[in-house]
Structure formats: C-alpha cells, structure tokens
Image (cartoon, grey):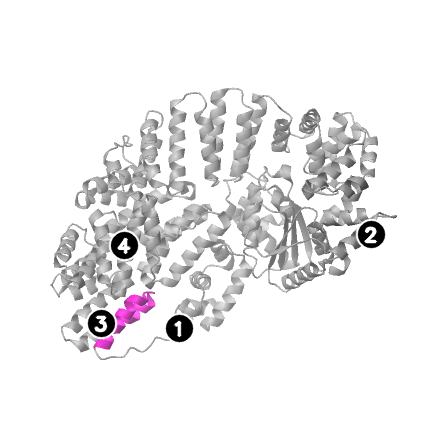
Amino acid sequence: MSEDLLGRRAEGETLERLLTRARSGAGQVLVLRGEAGIGKTALLDRVSERAAGFRVARAAGVEAESAFAYAALHQLCLPFLDRLGKLPGPQEEALATAFGLAAGPRPTRFMVGLAVLTLLADVADEQPLVCLVDDAQWLDTMSSAVLAFVARRLLAERIALVFVLRDGNDYLDGLPELQVRGLDDADARALLDSVVKGPVDNRVRDRIVAEARGNPLALLELPRAWTAAELADGLDAVPLTSRIEQGFVRQVAPLPADTRLLLLTAAAEPLGDATLLWRAAGLLGLGADPAAAAEETGLIEFGARVRFRHPLVRSAVYRSAAVADRLAVHRALAEVTDPAVDPDRRAWHRAQGTTSPDEEVAADLEHSAGRAQARGGLLAAAAFLEQAAVLTPEPGLRARRELAAARAKRDAGALDAALRLLSAVEAGPSDERRSAEVEHLRGHIAFDQRHVAQAAPLLFSAAARLTPFDPGLARETHLEAVSAAIWAAEPAQIASHTAPPPHVPPSATDLVLDALTSRVTLGYAASVPAMTRALDAVRSVRVGAEDVSRLPWLLGHRAGGMLASELWDFETRRAFAQRQVRLARDAGALVQLQFALNFLADNELLAGEPAAAQALIEEDLRISEVTGTRPVGYAVLLQAALRGEDTGAAIGREARAAGQGRLATITDWASALLHNGQGRHDLARDAALRVFAEDSPVYGCLATAELAEAASRTGDAALVAQALARSASWVDTDWSLGIKARLRALNGDASGFPESIAHLERTALRGELARAHLLHGEWLRREGHRVEARDHLRTAHEMLVAAGMPAFAERANRELLATGETVRKRTVETTDELTAQEYQIARLAGEGYSNPEIGTRLFLSPRTVEWHLRKVFGKLGVTSRRQLRDAAF
C-alpha cells in the first residue's frame, strides 16, 4: 500500500496491518485525523484498492447533509439493505424506520446501532468487510452516534472501519487514532516537481514548500492559484485552508457566468445526484456548454454522480457565490425535488431559497421535523423546527415551534441549546399555558443537569399553572416536583405545595404521589397505609415499552422502588428493578436504562451478587460511552463501601455544595457502611447519625441498622435505644424482622442474634445474613463461647468473601484469630477469572438465551457473544450450554 503514496510508508503499513487483522476475524477501527488536504482521502482510496478479498462500503459526510438524520449511515448501509429481513424483528423495524423505509415506533440510537452491527456482521460472515467513512467531521449526529456505537463493538468480526476527519466529532473520541501529518521537506519537493512542469524560480519553489508545510493539496493547488510574485511575497497572514479555498475561488472567478452557476448548483445539491442537477440546470436556463467548461477546469467530474475534486472546492464555490444566485439555485433544486420521494430535502431547499417569513415553507419544515422525530433524529427535528420558527410570520406560532424545538433538543441531550431556545420562547407574545410549559421544561432540564434544588420549585410552579389546562399533566408534574424535592432533601417544599386534584378513581401515579407526600410530610408510621396501597397498585399496573418515561416513577428508585424499600419488601424491590431494566432495554431508552441498571446493581449488591452487580455497572459505563451522557454511578457508591474503598467523601462534599441533598445522604449511608466494615465505629456512628436525624425515605431505615451497630461499639447506648425505638413502626417482613431482631440484640437482648439469622435466611439478602452471623459470632467470642463462635465466624467469613465485602470479611478473620483459629485463605475460584461481561454472558446463556438474544441485551453481535462464550467454557471447564447451567459461577 505504502509504495504508491509518496511519504506515506508508515501510514500504509498501519493500514495493511489493520486489513490483515480484520481478515483474520479481529475487528479493527481506526480514525485518520489531519488538516484539510493532508492526504487522508488518498489513504482511504489506497485501502479500498488494496483490500483484496474484502467487500468495500463507503460513505462521506457532507456539510449540507449534517441536518438530515441517518444520511451518512444510509449511504454506508444502502448496498446491504436487501438483508434487512434477516435481522431480528425489533432491529429490522428500527432500521427500516430510521431510513424511512417503513413506518414504525420511533427507534432509538441503541436499537439502530444494534441493527447496523448485526447487518454488517451478517455481511462479514460471508466476506470480510471494510467500511470507509470520509469527512466524518460533517456526519449527521445520528450517523456519528450509531457508527461510534458499532466501532466500539467490533471485537470478533471480520470488519475494518476507518474514519477520516479533520476535527470536531466528539463521538469518535477515544477510538484508535492515527494523526496524518505533512510530508517531510524532501517528499514535499518531490511531489511539487511531479506536478510543476518547466523551470520555476528556486525562490518561488522554496516559498511554495514553506507555505504548504508538507500539505499535499497545498503543494498541488498553490502553484495553480497564486502568482509567482504573490508566492514570493508570502501569504503568512492567511490560514492554509483558507489559502487553498481562496485558490479555488480564483480558479472559478474567470469562468463564464453560466459555468459558475452550474458549479454553484452542483455545490448546493449535496447528494451529487446528476439527474437532479440537470433538471435544475434546465430550469435555470443552463445548457450543455457550461458543463464542458466546468469539467475542463478539473474541479468537478460529471457522471452518474457529480464529484468535486475536493470538498474545499464545493465550499469555495458555494461561499463565494452571490446571495441572489444561491437563492435562485435552491429554489430551482426545490422545484425539481419530488415531494413524494424526498419531501425533507425539498423543504430544506425551499428554506434555503427563502429570505423572508413564509408560513408555507415553515409548515413544510415542521412536517419534516415530525418525520425526523419519528425516525429517532431528535437533533435533526430540532434543527428543522428552529428553522421553521425563523420563517414563521405569526409570533404565537413561532413561539410554539421554538418550544417544540427546545423539547426535541432536551430529549436529545442538548440541554444548553434547549435553554437558549426557551429564552427565545419567553420573548414571544404572552400565553399562560405556553409559559407554564416553558417552566415545566426548565424544571426537567434542571433535573437532568442534577440541579435538583433548582428543579423542585420550577416543577411545583409549573404543576400549579398547568392545572387549569391539563389536570393529568399537572398531577404528573407535581410528582416530578416531589421527587426533585426529595432528591434535594428539602421536605419543606413538599409540605408547602398542594397537589392538583387526583383522578377518580385514583391511578397508580395518584397513589404513588399521595404516598410519597405523606411519607415526607407525616413521617413513616402515618404513611404506611398509603404506601401499602400505592405499592399494591404499582405491582398490578401494566407497563409497556411505550410507557418508558413513566418507568422511574412506577418501577424505579424515584418512587415505586422507594416504596418497596420503605416497606422492607426486597423481593418486590428487586423484581421492580429487573422489570425496569427489561422494559427500558426493549424500548431502547438508554438514559432510562442507565438508571434502571444502577437500581438493579444496588439490589444485586445487597443480595451478595458482586459479579452480577459489576456487569450492570459496566453496562452503565458502556451506555455512557455510546450516548455521551454521564454515568449514573450511584451503585458504585454502595459497591465501594462494601469493598472497603472510601470514594464517597468527595462525592458527598460536591453533592452538598450542588444542593443534591439526597446524594449526600446516600454517601453518608455508604460511609457508615464502609466504616462499620473497617471497624472505625466512631466515624460510622457520625455518618449514620446524620441520615438518622433526617429520617430520609429509604436511607433513614437503612442507616438505622448502621447507627445501632456503630453506637453499640462506641458505648452510645442511648443511640442504640433510639434506633430500636425507630424500628417499632416498621412493617413486618423477614427483612425488617431480621434487622429489628439485630437491634434488640445490640440493645442487650442476646436472643435477637439467632432470631435475626433465622429471618434473614428466608430472604435473598446474603450480605445482611453474613453480617448477622458475624455479629452473633463476635458476641459469642466476647462471652467466651469460642467453639460456637467459630462456626458463625467461619460462615460469616465465607459468605462475606463471596458477597464482595472484604472489609467485613477481615473483621470476621480478626475475630477467628482471637478464638485461636487460623483462617485458610480462600483460593481464587474459576468464576473469579471471568470478566464482568463474561459473567453476564455466561449467566444469560445458562438461562437459555440464544447468542442473538444475548447480543441484543448486551449491545454485542452474535459472533462476539460466541467468542466470549468460548472463553467462558474454557475458564469454567465446560463444553456445552447444558453444563453451563449446572456450573457454579
């Protein structure tokens, strides 16, 4: 590859290795990054030429196409769309909907990404595949997100994916990268000599080499566009890319007016569609002669597709054209674009050809926004709506479209851009309902940005203002406000606001709202009946993927899960989390899935399943990489505390400073747990006491046990008694009865120790059961019952190690040493060798899921799942899925 490109031996060898590895079944990704004209596209061309035995697919970003969702992805996948029917049903539906081939539910990046990964993997099963993406800095957002998703999952595929870009595509950050730099001086002179015929003054030659700084395009174009005198004088004040672009403008300027207009028409038509170009040219009165003159310049090639010599030619032609000519060209292109076949591109050309408000054009753009939103292109929808607003003559309708654009930006995660649009909406004509909707959206954005102290008052106000217009929405908004106030740890806000009237009969949402409000304002004991009714309602409610926005309130730890915790119902708590994860996955709602994964990881940690929890935590991180959102990360606090790692102190300080009171409460609870494990009971007492004093929902109950254990070791008998008194109001379940018995034992009634063990043995809470054995063993050892103590301490030690609680396990070890017994170090078992992802795959395979089904759940291709399973079989010493079901891991 390298011998044909001057000065590119190292780059060529890197690309040869990439193809070799991909051919052998190790998926490869590379980003070629460098300035315009540096030779990146030439390297792509060489990859295409030398990819013997590969199928080659190409796509390129086009600046004017960046507003069209999935435009570049469609280019890349177009040759393979005859295989759509081979995809799993949800993936086929998502990709067909994204490409406008079918009408279906709005697809998500996740499902489209998984469909593209499966599609490309299917192609590569037959023949190795190389995908080349040029000018990736101009990819539309959805194409960027999906291709980055695919790139991070090419593990066991015969696929090579190469991107070329200048800069500015955050989705591709972190992928393997090769910086393409300028040619050295000798190679630059050799390239210049190959294109400049005849004698050239050495001073001019030196100036060209100096000005070009090794940029091949500059070495080729500067001599064509600039006079020897200009080059000799130097052009240092002008950036190199601008110099090259100006050079192209100089080459275009002397051409006849019709030729320039034809070039402009080609520049304004981003698809390179020759049929459209010639139709528009006819409408503009251009004949065949301008085409011949344009082609003679070497700047453009006319064929089945129209291609400029370089993207800078396109931008130079378009930017240098007169405004009147640009408007005329776009109007002509709009006229020849079939509204039935490509209504969105027609609407875009109409908008580009319009300078004054025009409701007909604005309505076209609004319809395009609806189609983009239906295909999952939220940012594209926002762009269409924003442009529609600019062209809307009527001020009220303009504000409505601006508000719709802000909602689309918020849903797409562009929060700051959404806030800027809301300022424009508020500058529009007065409208009480719209003003309430703006406040509602501001509250949502504040919640999204973790500014919960700001979110609560906005949402309370919005709920009250929405009541006359939409009582149902007002009620839901009030629930959001209550949740924000809980997360801000500001219960006074809840008490000072009256909720809008409920439905008759009350819905599950109504019951949840009443229960949470009662819990915060009246306390635990008074709210048990309301919480019980609400939990029963949530258990029985039918929730589907279409209700994904309701999942955090009904099943998650913002409401339904919170009630299950308050009522000490671990089985329901865990079932809610599992259901929330499944539904969020099915809907492809990635941000909702992140919260669900953390809630389930929390439950797995309490159940003593550290490997399962780790897999869920890593999944949160993988989604964060795909979407660009922050990891939720709440489960990491509990995980670190159980491991004996102090990571919560800094998070707690930041949370308090940011007004995130509930997060600070969580860090205090985790800190109490951490320090009890480490035997630093004074620190544990102080942290638990802060939570105990707040009586925070969920964590007030959980911290009560930590407070009693710590206080019993620091001699604070009064605090132990207070903790025991607090537990009297708790509802009775095996979980709560096990903790209550522990508190009685710590308060002096030793019969509580075995009773606690008996209750907790009937739950899935292996960590709490292990701690019950530890506390009983410690008490027996202090009382002199060494033999009996050893049994409990050995059991505790084994369970705590298995539960991923090494600090508590070390406590058990110290107690065993005090009884005179030496603990044999536990050898590393086979499952300890499994990575978190391997564990998750092994678990799903053992439950009977197929490779495609596992891939759907874990964002992997079936071939990659198979690759992981082979490693799992080797580590576990099994040879079949049947054996896997019986293996201990």
Question: Dot 2 corresponds to which residue?
Answer: 194
Q: CA distance from mark 4 to mark 1?
A: 31 Å
Q: Nearer the viewer, mark 2 or mark 4?
A: 2
Q: Amino acid at mark 1?
A: Glu
**Where does the magenta region start and end?**
793-818
Tag 1 near tag 3, CB within 8 Å: no
User: Does residue 182 sit above or below 456 in this rendering?
Assistant: below
Binning the other alpha carbons within 10 Å of mark 1 as few (below 14), some (14 to 19) or many (20 upward) gives few
Q: Amino acid at mark 3?
A: His
Label located before the other in sequence (4 or 1): 4
Place residue 754 in its image quadrant: bottom left
Question: Dot 4 corresponds to which residue?
Answer: 669
Question: Dot 1 corresponds to which residue?
Answer: 829
Q: Does 574 sit left or right of 589 as displayed?
A: left
Binning the other alpha carbons within 10 Å of mark 2 as few (below 14), some (14 to 19) or many (20 upward) gives few
Q: Does 782 sit left or right of 27 as displayed?
A: left
Measured as percent of width and height from the top left, residue 870 is found at 52, 68
Label located before the other in sequence (4 or 3): 4
Which quadrant of the figure contains the C terminus? bottom left
